[in-house]
Amino acid sequence: MKLHGYFRSSASYRVRIALNLKGLTSEHLPHHLRKGEQCAPAYLAINPQGLVPTLESDAGAILTQSLAIIEWLDETNPNPPLLPKDPLRRAKVRAFAQAIACDTHPVQNLKVLARLRQLGLPEEQVTEWAAWANREGLSACETLIAAESGPFCFGDQPTLADLCLVPQLANARRFGVDVSAYPRLLKAEAAAKQIKAFADAAPDKQPDAE
């Protein structure tokens, strides 16, 4: 398999964790987002959104969108499972993951921040926008799992929820968010970071890290 990504992309980070948990190897093909390499014609030919990650399977299939990629990996390599068997629990895990991947991450990603700069916002306000988006999303996520005993987001094993949470907390810290306001999320993060698959997927462990 080939994984097109960027070391600091939280969406790519999610997929790296999933690959590691499944014990799968992939060739990492970096695309430097700040240099606009994701907009190169050759890359747009496989991912017309110009986003990372993109996964090329061994059979040559092209998959985009991190949650879709992770669920495909989970369905084709079911151990360890990343979603609970119980339909209600599975829906709760998906809802948490989507709160991050669909409602929090997109409004603070590089593309949106670049647009804010184009509209003339000073850098301080751009950074505050990103911090606000993180605070809003993480506050909701803290409440979503407040009654979950853990130590992970949903139980005693990592799920899709944890794969989304760990990269988003890293984003929040980059934008200066005081994450101590989210003790339940930090409990799940601490449990995840004890697992080698999570540690090895961290941005600073990637070959293209700057």
Image (cartoon, rainbow, N blue to C red):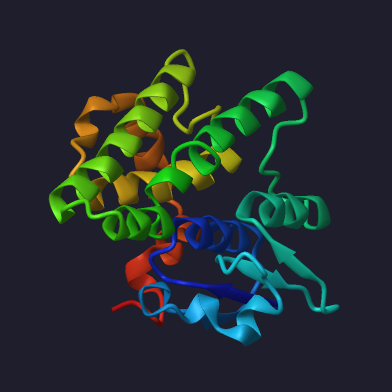
| Left or right of 104 on screen, residue 180 | left
**61 or 180, which lies in front?**
61
Instruction: Examine the rendering and report whether any part of residue 105 can be seen.
Output: no
Instruction: Examine the rendering and report whether any part of residue 77 can be seen.
Output: yes
Q: Is residue 207 above or below residue 133?
A: below
Quarter of the image with the C terminus is bottom left
Quarter of the image with the N terminus is bottom right
Q: Percent x, y for residue 114?
A: 34, 60
The quarter of the displayed image where residue 183 is located: top left
Q: Residue at x 64, y 33 (%)?
A: 94
The quarter of the displayed image where residue 64 is located: bottom right
Residue furthest bottom as drawn: 42
Q: Percent x, y for residue 179?
A: 24, 35
Q: Residue at x 33, y 50 (%)?
A: 171
Q: Percent x, y for residue 69?
A: 69, 57
| Left or right of 151 on screen, residue 46 | right
Residue furthest right as drawn: 59
**119 or 19, which lies in front?**
119
The quarter of the displayed image where residue 84 is located: top right
